[in-house]
Image (cartoon, rainbow, N blue to C red):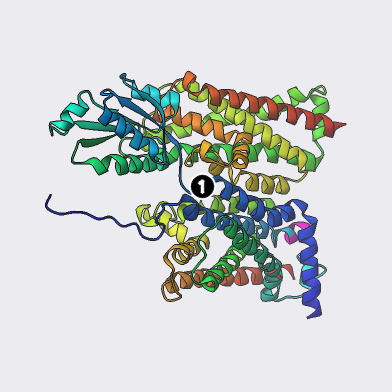
């Protein structure tokens, strides 16, 4: 029994000596439990942006518009009598749906001709699209005797889950690989004590050292991209229309991730701790990225968390390029955010490298 | 109209996404933490050169005792996590299970299973870094493979089978049934059996492998 106790004592000491693991193990559930909860705290979507094109503008159609406006789930961001290019409007206004009320709507209803009302659903995010569709059906479906309701899905028309979820998985894999590989490389140099030598070799220039260490992995990530391209082909997914811009945002993404990996590799002096840290850190990035649960439906704290990681702007921008066939201008906000993060992490990495070498 | 159709939503009537996803996320991160912590349990001893008569084996030669010692601290600490889960779930007003003890037993079985899986890895792979990296490849896709969002019957057979050897999979099934469908012990017996089976398999593997490692070390 005594032996067992001393064994346990030893085990506990081992656990307590690994500070990273201890903090993560005891703090992780509190932090992540709260953070995941804060993302989904509302439980249901509210105020999802929807456009209404009311060509009739009659008392009956206005009443219909009011009914749509009254549901919690929808928020009418624009009500207009004019024709709108919906695919463009969905891109520019990030709307999840549109309802089109035709000309002579009231007249046709009064004559019992059952006019046709069209609901367009932006199907890029299947989760939000489901909620918008249900809310529109609930309002307009209750007036079936007055008009036909036709639902048309744009972008991922067949609600293909593969097409929806796949880009996010590719990005997660790319992120983990780049971060971990760079972190391990820096941590190894610290373990073997070769960082100082390499720093001297690079003429005491942090930037040159970083370029030398990181560039091979960036080149390597292009090989990964090539493999992904092959998978697109194998799984019969359509290629993004504007490949150049995809490569550009991917480059920003991998660079930022390699800086994060470098920071972890410098701060944690052993490969193992760096790996453990990055694994736990990257657990919630998908949840807080707004890929399935739109970003503006998050609590503010969860939003802050998403804003810190390069995954959020990348995966949202990538989806617009891939599924909505967007252009650079459609994702300029995300690109700016990526640049900002790139600069921030670069400066942090350089600062830490200089500090350690002193 | 020839007839009318009525649609009734059962269980999560308000289609509340928080109730649907949050509890699963908490336990999928718990599994990941446990795997990560225990992946280094024995490999750290090999790496530090303490897996011998002067070090760890000086206390005991029995694989059962050694596994028990490695496992117990994490098992006890997991009460903290489970406590936090219940506390936070009250804050977020997650439905309380109809049979809390049933859910608690499934949670403890999950903890035991995940610990033993981590221990088995750390016995097989002598380098702590390698053990962690390899476990990462299991832990990361575990949630997707568990069939919690994309039912495993809809996935290719190989991936569904892969999901079935991870302790998280049967646990998530029990959790959904107890939280939303008010399941009783009889309802979740197959899932609990699945959990126990996984534990038995991992424990046997760990003991056998550790025994041969001990023999070699002595």
Residue A345 on image: x %, y %: 69, 30
Say if A181 sits above or below A42 in the image. above
Residue B207 on image: x %, y %: 62, 72
The kind of secondary structure the magenta stretch mainly shows is: helix
Return the chain for callout 1. Answer: A
Query: Could you tell me which residue is drawn at 74 percent across and 23 percent down?
Result: A207
Residue B65 sits in quarter:
bottom right
Decide if residue B124 is in sight here: no
Residue B36 on image: x %, y %: 64, 55
Per the image, the residue denoted by label 1 is A42
Residue B142 on image: x %, y %: 51, 54
Query: Could you tell me which residue is drawn at 12 percent across and 31 percent down?
Result: A111
Which sits in the foreground, A27 or A246? A27
Asked if residue A286 lies in the magenta stretch, the reply is no
Query: Could you tell me which residue is drawn at 24 percent across and 32 percent down?
Result: A117
Q: Secondary structure at mark 1?
A: loop
| Magenta range | B45-49
Tally the marks. 1
Residue at the extreme right of the image, as rendered = A358
Mark 1 Cα-neighbour bin, 10 Å: few <14, some 14–19, many ≥20: some
In the visual, does A132 lie left or right of A183? left
In the visual, does B158 lie left or right of A38? left
Which sits in the foreground, A50 or B56? A50
In the visual, does A125 lie left or right of A172? left
């Amino acid at each position: 029994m005594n032996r067992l106790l001393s064994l346990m004592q030893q085990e506990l000491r081992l656990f307590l000596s690994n500070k990273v693991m201890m903090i993560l193990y005891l703090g992780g559930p509190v932090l992540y439990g709260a953070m995941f909860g804060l993302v989904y705290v509302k439980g249901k979507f509210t105020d999802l942006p929807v456009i209404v094109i009311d060509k009739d503008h009659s008392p009956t159609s206005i009443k219909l518009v009011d009914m749509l406006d009254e549901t919690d789930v929808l928020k009418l961001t624009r009500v207009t009598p004019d024709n709108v290019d919906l695919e463009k409007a969905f891109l520019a206004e990030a709307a999840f749906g549109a309802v089109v009320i035709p000309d002579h709507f009231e007249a046709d209803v009064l004559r019992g001709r059952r006019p046709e009302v069209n609901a367009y659903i932006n199907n890029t995010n299947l989760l939000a699209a489901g909620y918008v569709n249900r809310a529109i059906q609930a309002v307009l479906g209750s007036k079936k005797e007055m008009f036909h309701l036709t639902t048309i899905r744009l972008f991922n028309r067949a609600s293909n889950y593969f097409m929806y979820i796949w880009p996010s998985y590719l990005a997660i894999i790319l992120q983990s690989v780049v971060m971990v590989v760079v972190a391990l490389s820096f941590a190894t140099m610290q373990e073997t004590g070769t960082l100082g030598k390499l720093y001297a070799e690079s003429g005491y220039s942090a930037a040159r050292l970083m370029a030398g260490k990181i560039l091979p992995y960036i080149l390597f990530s292009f090989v990964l991209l090539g493999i992904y391209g092959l998978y697109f082909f194998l799984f019969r997914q359509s290629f993004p229309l504007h490949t150049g811009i995809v490569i550009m945002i991917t480059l920003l993404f991998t660079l930022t991730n390699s800086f994060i990996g470098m920071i972890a590799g410098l701060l944690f002096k052993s490969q193992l701790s760096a790996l453990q840290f990055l694994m736990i850190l990257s657990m919630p990035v998908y949840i807080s990225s707004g890929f399935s649960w739109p970003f503006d439906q998050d609590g503010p704290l969860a939003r802050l968390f998403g804003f810190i990681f390069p995954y959020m702007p990348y995966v949202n921008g990538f989806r617009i390029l891939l599924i909505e066939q967007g252009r650079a201008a459609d994702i300029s906000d995300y690109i700016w955010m990526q640049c900002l993060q790139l600069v921030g992490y670069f400066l942090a990495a350089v600062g830490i490298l200089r500090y350690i070498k002193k | 109209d020839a007839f009318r159709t009525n649609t009734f939503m059962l269980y999560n009537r308000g289609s509340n996404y928080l109730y649907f996803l949050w509890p699963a996320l908490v336990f999928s991160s718990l599994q990941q933490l446990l795997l990560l912590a225990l992946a280094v349990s024995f490999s750290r001893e090999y790496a530090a050169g303490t897996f011998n008569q002067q070090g760890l084996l000086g206390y005991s030669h029995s694989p059962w005792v050694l596994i028990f010692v490695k496992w117990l601290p994490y098992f006890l600490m997991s009460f903290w996590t489970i406590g936090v889960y219940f506390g936070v779930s009250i804050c977020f007003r997650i439905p309380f299970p109809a049979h809390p003890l049933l859910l608690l037993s499934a949670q403890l079985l999950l903890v035991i299973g995940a610990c033993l899986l981590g221990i088995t890895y750390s016995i097989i792979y002598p380098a702590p870094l390698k053990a962690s990296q390899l476990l990462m490849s299991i832990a990361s896709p575990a949630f997707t493979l568990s069939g919690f969002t994309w039912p495993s019957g809809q996935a290719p057979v190989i991936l569904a089978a892969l999901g079935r050897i991870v302790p998280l999979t049967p646990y998530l099934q029990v959790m959904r049934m107890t939280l939303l469908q008010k399941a009783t012990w009889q309802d979740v017996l197959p899932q609990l059996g699945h959990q126990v089976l996984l534990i038995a398999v991992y424990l046997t593997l760990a003991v056998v492998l550790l025994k041969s490692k001990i023999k070699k070390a002595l």
